[in-house]
Amino acid sequence: MGDVRAIVADSWTVAVALALMVGGLPQSARAEPTAGPVEPTIEEMLAQAVAEVDAEVKLELPTELVAPPVPALAEARQLEADLRFAEAARIYEAQWQATGDARFLYHAAVAHGQAGHHAVARRLYEQCQTTMHARGALSQLAGRWLDLAIMREAVATKRVYLTLVESLPGGLTAVPPGTLAAARTVLRKLGAAGEAVPGDSFEISGRLPDELRLDPGSWSVQVEVPGFVPQALQIVVGDGSPPWQVVLYRRKIVVDLRFSPERALRGAQLKLQAVDHPSPFALQRPLLGPTATVTLTPGAWRLQVDARRHVADMNLAIGTGMGPIDVTLHRRRPVDDQRLVRDRKLVAGLLGTFGATYATSIVLLVLGASVEKKAEKRDAAAYEDAGLDPKMPGEIEAATAAAIEATYPAAQLHRDLTYAGKLHAAGTVVAGVGLGALLAALPVAVRAQRRAAVIELGFGAAMLAGGGGWLGYALGERERLLADPDQRVLPSRLDRSEGHRIAAGLFTGVGLGLVVFSGVVLARDVADRRKRARALTAAPWAAPGLAGWSLAGRF
């Protein structure tokens, strides 16, 4: 007996190795023609190994696989004796359903194999082996017996490459594994006239196995996946069969949406986006009324409504047979509102800053103009006292230049003009700062989006950088002309750079004002949001037999 068991073990090892080769090699590798003598295929080698094992192993059926004595067993045996194997298989399967005894699965598989239903027989052998192994009722000999039976049926089948793909606007794509978990695939063998062969069919729940083997011939494939339109496909199994694809199309479901309260829908935007799958029906559009009808695909969706003062955000599970969906908008929480708060004190402060800087700039400009005017008058009087026209002095003799220098020294003239230029520059910069404060107040006054203040801050930084460089250049040119006290400069020569100095000063001032006061606006908004996020909220609360108020807060 020990020698026989050794023969079984060795033969089983050879057969398993060959089976792994069959399952592991792609179809193209097995079908490539080779030069020289025709070698046997892997299927033929496996069949030869199985035949050798069958010839060597003359053991009786392991006791774990002997059918239990039930009244229906005699009828099944008689049907097998009459070569009505498909009917006998149905009796064994019915006994398995009634008793849960895995031994009936084995005998049902034997009957299916004798009826020519090798793919069904192979699956039943595998189910029997898995069930008995899970229950701990499978000996090593019985397990090898079943392994040999599974390989015997595999010899009579052909490997089929069958995949499920989803049709999308961009092309075909793999169906998500989570969706395939609920798939149902029914395979039926077809006769010569296209009719279903009785008993030669089986069902696969979930994703298709990596190695699907079917009997040669025509098969009907019916696929049902939740959320998709059922699909049917007829395939022909044989040597060199091409890969098959079942293209799935998601169902289109018309959904009615009802929004309330209606007064909250002013300026509302509706956004629908699929969560667990790509969908061509994702949308974003204005919400024009309290109702909307949309076409969606089955699955998880996110619905968002963004109105001026109200919002809604909810997850939807779209499926067949859905009724209207009620969407209730709630008032936007202050901490969630992206608009700036209309802070009257802040607006008043910014407007007050504008007024103060405006008045200060006028004072500085008037003072600078006065100093410059006095310097020009003193310089003109010095020229006139020397008998020269201050506008066209021409060539000046040494004695005349000394007289002019004695009346109004060039160094004093340059100091006065430098002081007047600084007053002018300060006045234009302060005026620009006032304009920046006024511009920074506008988003707060109109409750603009928070990003408006951020944009102003960015523009202000750019203007400050550019205007500062420009103003530095203009002032540098003026200082260069006034740097030498021995070279008397006519005030008219300085007027050439006056336009640059004024424009650069305003540009710099506006940039500085936007940076400072937009930063104040944003800092005030951040502080206000933090304060409101920590605020306590109270609401009525009720439970069976109880009533009261709930107090909530964030700390």
Image (spheres, grey):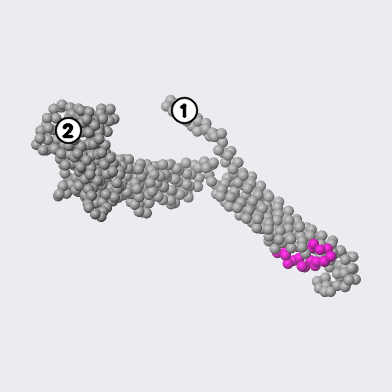
Cα distance between the residues tagged 1 and 2: 82 Å
| Pointer 2 residue | 58
Q: Which x, y percent locates residue 476?
A: 74, 61
> In the image, which residues are magenta?
482-499
Residue at horizontal 26%, vertical 30%?
Answer: 140
- Marks 1, 2: nearer the viewer: 2
Q: Which x, y percent locates residue 39?
A: 23, 49
Q: Determine if the magenta segment contains residue 552.
A: no
Of the pair 211 and 224, the residue shown nearer to us: 211
| In the image, residue 263 above or below residue 78 | below
Residue at horizontal 28%, vertical 43%?
Answer: 21
Residue 199 figure quarter = top left
Q: Quadrant of the N terminus?
A: top left
Residue at horizontal 37%, vertical 54%?
Answer: 170
Of the pair 184 and 119, the residue shown nearer to us: 119
Residue 498 located left or right of residue 207: right
Give the residue type at disc 1: Ala
Can residue 380 be seen here? The reply is yes
Q: Which x, y percent locates residue 135?
A: 27, 28
Q: Secondary structure at mark 2?
A: loop
Label 1 Cα neighbours within 10 Å, binned few <14 / some 14-19 / many ≥20:
few
Q: Give the total number of marks visible in the rendering.
A: 2
Q: Quadrant of the C terminus?
A: top right
Q: Secondary structure at mark 1?
A: strand
Give the residue type at disc 2: Lys
| In the image, residue 396 above or below residue 64 | below
| Pointer 1 residue | 547
Residue 553 located left or right of residue 207: right
Residue 478 located left or right of residue 253: right
